[in-house]
């Protein structure tokens, strides 16, 4: 679809994209833009993926005491050394 056509048919292009199509806009016969459906993304929290926050005992965590974080970092560093070839 040319830029000229795209200017006059934006509503139709959006309807096409909503139904899953991709629309390529051209200028002088060369592609210059592509309209694609928006992807809905969900956040994943690594080890907490799938955990309900109600199940986490956040009130039991002492955020001022970083010994648990330091221990986790040391474990991570040791595992990293084991992965190196």
Image (cartoon, rainbow, N blue to C red):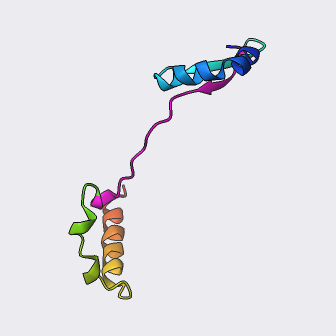
State the image quarter where residue 23 is shown.
Answer: top right
Residue 43 inside the magenta-drawn segment? yes
Q: Which residue does the image show at 25% across and 83% down from the upper left?
A: 60
Establish if 15 lies above or below 74: above
Pick whichever, 76 or 33, lies toward us. Answer: 33
Q: Which residues are magenta?
A: 30-48
Q: Which residue does the image show at 37% across and 58% down from the upper left?
A: 84
Pick whichever, 38 or 49, lies toward us. Answer: 38
Pick whichever, 49 or 15, lies toward us. Answer: 15
Coordinates of residue 75 in the picture (x, y in percent): 30, 71
Establish if 38 lies above or below 56: above
Coordinates of residue 42 in the picture (x, y in percent): 39, 47
State the image quarter where residue 14 is shown.
Answer: top right
Residue reaching furthest bottom? Answer: 64
Establish if 25 lies above or below 71: above
The quadrant in which the N terminus is found is top right
Q: Which residue does the image show at 50% across and 29% down from the upper left?
A: 37
Coordinates of residue 6 in the picture (x, y in percent): 69, 19
Q: Which residue does the image show at 39% across and 52% down from the upper left?
A: 43
Residue 47 inside the magenta-drawn segment? yes
Establish if 9 lies above or below 38: above
């Amino acid at each position: 679809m040319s830029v000229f056509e795209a200017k006059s048919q934006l509503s139709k292009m959006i309807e096409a994209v909503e139904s899953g199509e991709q629309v390529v806009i051209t200028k002088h016969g060369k592609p210059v833009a592509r309209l694609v459906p928006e992807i809905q993304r969900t956040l994943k929290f690594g080890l907490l993926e799938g955990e309900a926050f109600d199940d986490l005992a956040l009130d039991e965590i002492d955020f001022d005491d970083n010994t648990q974080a330091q221990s986790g970092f040391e474990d991570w560093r040791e595992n990293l050394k084991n992965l190196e070839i």
